[in-house]
Image: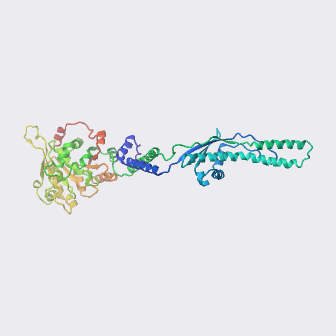
Amino acid sequence: MEAAENITVEQLVGVLRRRWLIPLILALVGAAVAFAVSLQTPQSYRASASVLVGGAENVPLIGSVSSPQSLSAATAADLIHTRTIAALVQHALPTTRSTSDLLSRIAVSADSQSGIVTITGSGASGAEAAAIANGFASEFVKTRAEAPYIRLTKAVAAVTAQLETVPRTGAEHAALASQLRQLRALAALPTSDAQVVDPAVPARSPSSPRLFTDTLSGLGVALLLGLLAAFVLEALDPRVKTSDELHRLVPMPQLAGVPLAVFRPAFPLRNRPGREPRVITVAKQYGESFERLRTSLLVFNGERELKTVLVTSPAHEKEGKTTVAANLAVALGKIGLRVCVVDADLRRPRLARYFGFEHAERGLVDVLAGAPLETVISRFPLPGAPVLNGNGSDPAHALEIAVLPAGKLTAFPAELLASKQMQDTIDELESMYDIVVLDCAPLLAASDAMPLVARAGGTVLVIRLFQTPRKAALRAVRVIERAHGSLMGVVTTGVPPRELREEGFGPWPAESVSSVAARVS
């Protein structure tokens, strides 16, 4: 098995070109949802206060009282975001919010290098947000300021108790008395390892929601999800989507590409009074595609006698096999070849309507039942100048092709097409015409075409982009091989105009059509 090829930029662009509607719709929906949510979201304000921590001097204490330790910014951030501080703030502020609600409305961050702790509060107004941030900052500073005072008070009590056990006369009493005076002086001026350096100021505009930013964010997120959905759908899509993909799947010559516009309502199948048959309308606007198909068949098979060409598709008639068969016959007839196109799809015959013979009651079924061939064949004149026969000295004849409709529906299509009468009919047609084009039923839909695949000189497989599954295309190729048929190439239908311009079809050696036609005839 060959290694998978790397995805190219062109392939990614192709996916976006085919699936652009999915990201667009999701992006618009995401932006609309984000805009609606922003309108319904209550306004919220934010304000920040800064606290500087660390730098307190150690106070020499006596007894069991330990000296205060230096406070780090990270530890201070953890201490601020506690229920103890929140309870103090709740009592200090005129608010009805609970301690849990107050804690949910602050965000604390610490800068270890500078020792600054930033307290950001949020509220329904700018004043409330600033009050919450300042409340947590001030209560934390007060708490830190009370810690050394409590230690000093304990030390004063300890020294006082010790003085009562020491004689009033002596050096020890004098030293303790001096220490007691120092402690009382320090207790009167307690030190703190935290201070508010930048109090919070009420914000004038809300921090959320922001309609433009939220809408843009919703659009961006939805666009990414849309792109992801587009690529997922592309990966899960089992259909053939590009000519390059088809060539990698079926490494056979791509004989031609039929534009997508051929299958649009502008070219109706049913003919109205006064309107040209569909095959002529298509030939006038998109005849170049079928001329390329004609040239490809004649050039590729110039060294062998090509009398019968079978046109079929893998799955169903929507792939365009009848369109290709009818217009291939017209393209061959334009260069003076005697052509007969046969509707061998006895289950869903459509060929006659392409030429305006939808009211024909007799056809191939009647021939197989014993009717003379000449009495069933219809003549379809082609627009264009008359063609000279032979070397140009013979009289000119009008351009026309023979059309053999399917006839009435039958209950035994597979048996009729596999009969000896069908083989004899093809032999007779080959003796009367230069090329016979057979429009057959899809290979995988019925077994009708199987006997004709081996009998025909070559098979043209019609595959429509965004219609034919990849597995169906592979199975159709295997069916032709197992039936001992000759697959001459693939015709891609439903090709977008951009791909037709970029890829092109028929890049084979230039050879005059007249010389090829002369060799075939």
Query: At 17% across and 41% down in the image, what residue appears?
Result: 517
Q: Dividing the picture into quarters, in which one does residue 507 lie? A: top left
Q: Position of residue 119 (x, y in %)?
A: 61, 45
Front residue of 248 and 84: 84
Front residue of 184 and 72: 184
Query: What count of labels does the image hold?
Result: 0
Compared across the picture, whether 405 is left or right of 201 comes to: left
Query: At 60% across and 55% down in the image, what residue appears?
Result: 98
Q: In this orientation, does residue 475 appear?
A: yes
Front residue of 357 and 153: 153
Q: Position of residue 515 (x, y in %)?
A: 17, 38
What's the coloring here? rainbow
Compared across the picture, whether 418 is left or right of 242 comes to: left
Q: Position of residue 372 (x, y in %)?
A: 10, 56
Compared across the picture, whether 122 is left or right of 158 comes to: left
Image quadrant in which the C terminus is located: top left
The correct choice, above or below, for 362 with respect to 3 in the image is below
Q: Position of residue 362 (x, y in %)?
A: 13, 58
Q: In this orientation, does residue 228 appear?
A: no
Front residue of 263 and 159: 159
Q: Dividing the picture into quarters, in which one does residue 303 lie? A: top left
The correct choice, above or below, for 100 with respect to 515 in the image is below
Compared across the picture, whether 329 is left or right of 394 comes to: right
Q: Residue furthest front?
A: 94
